[in-house]
Each structure stands twice: as C-alpha cells, then as structure tokens.
Image: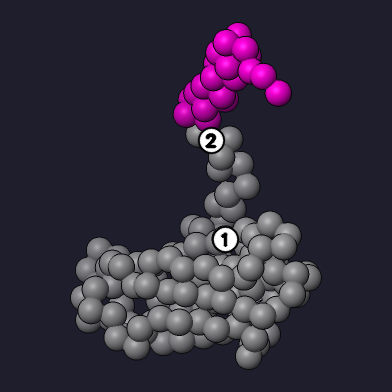
Amino acid sequence: MSMTRRSVIKAIATSGALLGLGVLSPRLAFAAWNEKAFRAKDQGTAMQELLGGEPQPSAEILLKAPDIAENGAVVPVTVSSTLSGVESISLFVEDNPTPLAVEFLLPPGTDADISTRIRMGKTSKITAVIKAEGKLYSAVKEVKVTIGGCGG
C-alpha cells in the first residue's frame, strides 16, 4: 500500500488531536478510579470498597518483597500467579494511612506478573489480592521498615 503525502499528514494530525485530547482531559483517564477504596483508612474497608469481599489465601500467588526495607519510600514488590483468568492485582499495606497502594487491571490473556515500588510508613503486612474468574485470592508478607516512607 502506497501512502501519499496527504494521508501521512492526515494520520499525523489525527494522532496529534487524540494525544491533545488526552492531555487536555486527564479526568477521562481516571474515570474508573475508585475514590472510596483509595481514601479508606483501614484495610477491610478498602478491600470491601474495591473488591466487594474478603479474599481467601492461595498458594498459587507468589508475593515477593524484602524482609527488611531500608527505605519505606521505595519498597520493591513483585506479584505473580498461576491462577487462570486473572482480572486484577491489588496491593494493600495494612498500617499505611490509606492501605490501598495500587490496583492493576489486566486484560484477558495477560500474564499475572507485576513489579512495582510502594510506600510504607512503618513495619506492616503487605497483602496482594488477585481477582480471578470472579473470585478473590490473597497472599501476605510482613516487611520491616527502618526509615518511614509515608511522611516519616
């Protein structure tokens, strides 16, 4: 297929307009943001608001985090799972001022394997919750923090 100068200019203008729309309307990107869950002050409320229930422990979830975090501002966390039909992976830090740290929504067919860095204000349990085929599963690990990351 041969592209003419006019079709190239049209493609550039269209993509620029779409990019500009995203820059000018950032609230559209946050349309699915669950404000109640992210602002909840305790882990139980955050889980209920985000997921609608309590997860069951699962050996099919691998939660990797350091035993001791020297800096709570940047705690590396990796979550992977062999569960099928994973829809989302969420991380909660039990003793943080707002326990829900992050939620990853995974498109169908995506490997359930994420890595990120989270903030921890003090020594606490990290809970990874996976929603797979409509059911909730979890894994928990305690991380000792030596320097606070949430204003500490």
Q: CA distance from mark 1 to mark 2?
A: 18 Å
Tell me the residue that label 1 is attached to. 104
Q: Inspect the magenta stretch and tell me whether residue 4 lies in it.
A: yes
Outermost front residue: 2
Residue 81 image offset from top left, x and y in percent: 62, 78
Please tell me which residue is depicted at 25% across the width and 63% down the height of the picture: 151
- Spot the residue most to the top: 6
What span is in magenta?
A: 1-25
Name the side, left or right, on which 95 lies relative to 109: left
User: Residue 67: horizontal and vertical position, in percent?
Assistant: 34, 88
Question: Is 144 on the left or on the right of 70, as rendered?
Answer: right
Indicate which disc residue 27 carries: 2
Is residue 81 part of the magenta span, yes or no? no
Q: Do residues under tags 1 and 2 come within 8 Å of each other at their CB atoms?
A: no
The disc label shown at residue 40, or none: none
**For the residue marked with disc 2, what is the amino acid?**
Arg
Q: Residues within 10 Å of mark 2 (few under 14, many from 20)?
A: few
115 over 37 or under it: above or below: below
User: Would residue 133 appear left or right of 130 to someone viewing this image?
Assistant: right
Q: Identify residue type, mark 1.
A: Phe
**Camera-nearest residue between 97 and 19:** 19
Rendering coords of residue 14 (x, y %):
59, 19
Camera-nearest residue between 134 and 94: 134
Which quarter of the figure is the N terminus placed in? Answer: top right
Earlier residue among tags 1 and 2: 2
Element under disc 2: helix
Q: Can residue 14 be seen by looking at this rendering?
A: no
